[in-house]
Amino acid sequence: KIMPASHHHHHRLMLASSTRTSARRFSSLRNKNPFIINKFRGINSSFIPKIACLQQRTMQDAFFFSARMQAKRNVHTVALNEENVQSELLSAAKPVVLKFEASWCGPCQQLSPILTKSLETYADDKVVLATLDVDTPMGQELAGRFQVKTIPVVFVLYQGQVISHFGGVLAQPDMDKWTEELVAMIDGDATGDQDAQVSEQGTEKEGDKPWLPADAIKDGQIKLKQGKYEDAMRAFGKVVSDPTADGYHPNALAGMARASLKLGKMDDAKNCVESIPNAAYETSNEVRAVAALVKLVESATSIKESKEDLQKRVEQDKNDLKAYYDLAQLFAAEENYDEAVNKAVHIIKKDKSWEKGAAKEFILSIIKALGDDSPVSTKARTKLANAMF
């Protein structure tokens, strides 16, 4: 039975509220009835809160919720060119999700199915997905207007303004969260009066807001930048300890590895990296960067001399390539990749075959860790090419 549009909107609001609290509901159910764990053993843990949520609903709610989660929608997608850019982008009636990409860009190909899945699941027919090849003349022109430095990058245009954007490849849970926030932003004008009513009635207090894994990861990253490494460990650890947030575990483990390195806990950092699923290395630049950083820091721990002493050695002898290499490793361990690359480039210019090309491999490991679209990687690749040829 197809519900009227008014009912559809009403239940969609219920869905948004329910999914936020599903993890807490499942925790309560689990404590009361351990059989839930055994009954659903083997099912991807990300579905558990949905199952628990269904147990709290009427049959009508459960039917709608199931249909909402399983329905396959086809978001309208268009490849921009000189003939359709005016109608599909500049004069579009709906918000346009504009993705800058290129055929040779690996991360662009990784992002495509993730972005499309989120838009199909959450955005319905509210947006248009437009792709633009930066290798075309028009693509280069628009990339210049949008000040695009790296790809993939996504902008959302609505009523002549950019209302949202992000760069790089997001994990599916993060992509879903971004899409839900975008839809809420688009629907804001239509539901503004309802939101104001809810606010006036005080039905949702600040302290009642549900815990979200993405918010915890963002908090952990802020704590890292502030040098509050123990606090960062707690924020990331909260995500890792929640089995219903398994989609966020790779980034949380990467954050824990960074914090562990800052705290001087090399073994803990290695354990975190080893706990990250192999599939995450294919989609997350952060995971690859942290894994490489852990290796670099581990290599640097075998260097006995201080950075200051090594600096004196290279100042006194430009042919002391071992000192240059040790310095490069120490700089990389501090994530000062520009200086690390400079030291390795010096070695290549002096002797390309030194230690079987160790300096070249060192630079390539940094590029691989940071990803092809990193500005540091771009500069490193240029410096390497100039030194080799």
Image: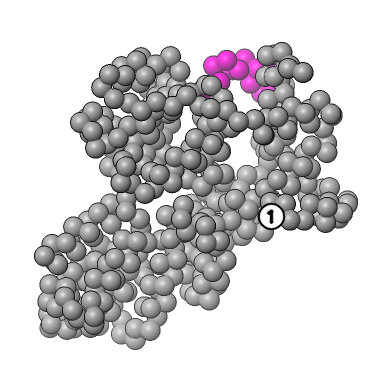
Give coordinates of residue 255: x percent, y percent.
51, 59
At x 55%, y 62%, the residue is 276
Q: Is residue 128 above or below residue 231?
A: above
Q: Is residue 55 above or below residue 377?
A: above
Tell whether position 196 is magenta. yes
Q: Secondary structure at mark 1?
A: helix
Residue type, label 1: Pro
Q: Does 25 sit left or right of 362 as displayed?
A: right
Q: Does 345 sit left or right of 280 as displayed?
A: left
Q: Does any portion of residue 123 appear in the rendered image?
A: no
At x 53%, y 21%, the residue is 125
The quarter in which the C terminus is drawn is bottom left
Write the start and end of the magenta stretch as one range. 185-199
Tell whether position 73 is magenta. no
At x 54%, y 16%, the residue is 189
Q: Quick one: 159 or 210, which is closer to the camera? A: 159
Residue located beneath label 1 in the image:
243
Give coordinates of residue 107: x percent, y percent.
39, 48
Q: Does any portion of residue 132 appear in the rendered image?
A: yes
Render colour scheme: one colour
Q: Is residue 238 above or below residue 358?
A: above
At x 30%, y 85%, the residue is 305
Q: Quick one: 81 or 16, which is closer to the camera? A: 81
Q: Picture quarter containing residue 194?
A: top right
Q: Main secondary structure of the magenta part?
A: helix
Q: Quick one: 240 or 247, which is closer to the camera? A: 247
